Amino acid sequence: MTVYQKLMYVSTSFAVALSVSMANYVFYDERLPDTTQTEGFYTDMQTQNDKLLKHFFPYEIVEYELEVPDNMSYTQAEFQKFKGTYLEKKSIAADESYLERIAFCGDSLTYHMGMNGNRLADYDVLAYGGLSVSDYATYTQNPVYNQSSVSGKTTIAWLSELKPEIVYLFLGANGMSIYDVNVHINLYKALLTKIKAATPSSKIVLVSASPWGTSANPQYTSKDIKELNARIDQFNMLLLELAKDNGCYFMNVAESMTDSSGYLLGSYDAGDGLHWSMAGRSNYVDYVLEHPIPGY
């Protein structure tokens, strides 16, 4: 018998054996009587067939703890490395006293939430309209702390004085259409270094940039909004990596503000595609309370 014939013989034998096993596995209940005498045979046959199938077609069902959000393109396996960094929703939200521990840092989106009549008005907000990662640490033209009318004092100086237990850093909107995402993240990293130096004991949460709405005002960007939102998704993934690499947390509020097409939800859009309505601002605070740092 030639080598070729032997291979054909082995292949045919294997195919027949596998076919019989699979047929037994699928149709055994139609061939054998349903009695107690056959119960043991059923169990043994299923066990042997499962072993045979798994041997030739190995597989493993893996249950992952973290689910990949819709606004990120990691595989389930890849995403597990962010366990402990990515803030997960708790079954019971933190109460409002959690907000007392936080300094909310950001641009106009955060600034508006700290104004009178908004949910963060009585809490520490360090923000001003138009700020970006490149000038957040040095801006002095207007008061940046909502609990003080003092101007000429930087956010970094305030952080150094306040020494908050937790810092929520929410920036990126004002640089998204200007910077390449890698340049943007490097600027963010430089700012993060300054914040950590100013208040080294603070826990820091990096907040995902929110998407733009379909009604985006040309005053704010001339870029195609769909492409801009794709850039935001990429930025947020890099921001998550930055959080992990620097021992920070990451809060993906963007997932709660994005519609099925990747745009800012209409109910959260204040009308210019960038800023939030009162509902959007309230959603942000609710999301903070529903996704607190572990242990709070």
Image (spheres, rainbow, N blue to C red):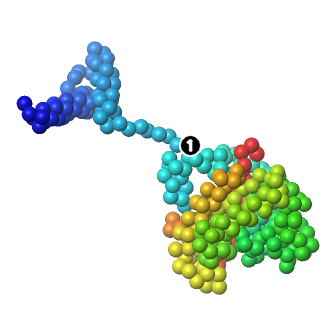
Q: Residue furthest top?
A: 37
Horizontal and vertical percent position of residue 97: 82, 51
In front here: 288 or 200? Answer: 200
Q: Residue furthest bottom?
A: 219
Under circle 1, the secondary element is loop
Q: Amino acid at mark 1?
A: Glu
Image quadrant occupied by the N terminus: top left
Residue under numbered circle 1: 65
Horizontal and vertical percent position of residue 265: 59, 68
Q: Residue furthest front?
A: 2
**What residue is at 54 percent from the left and 61 percent from the top?**
71
In this view, 296 is above or below 226: above
**Numbered label tally:** 1
**Can residue 148 be spotted in the picture?**
yes
**What residue is at 58 percent from the left and 83 percent from the top?**
222
Horizontal and vertical percent position of residue 61: 43, 38
User: Badge 1 local density, few (<14 within 10 Å), some, or many (20+)?
Assistant: few
Image quadrant occupied by the C terminus: top right
Horizontal and vertical percent position of residue 131: 74, 74
* Horizontal side, residue 41 vs residue 103: left or right: left
**What residue is at 60 percent from the left and 67 percent from the top?**
182
Give the quadrant of residue 3: top left
* Horizontal side, residue 122 vs residue 3: left or right: right
* Horizontal side, residue 221 vs residue 201: left or right: left
In this view, 147 is above or below 39: below
**Can residue 123 be spotted in the picture?**
no
**What residue is at 8 percent from the left and 34 percent from the top?**
2
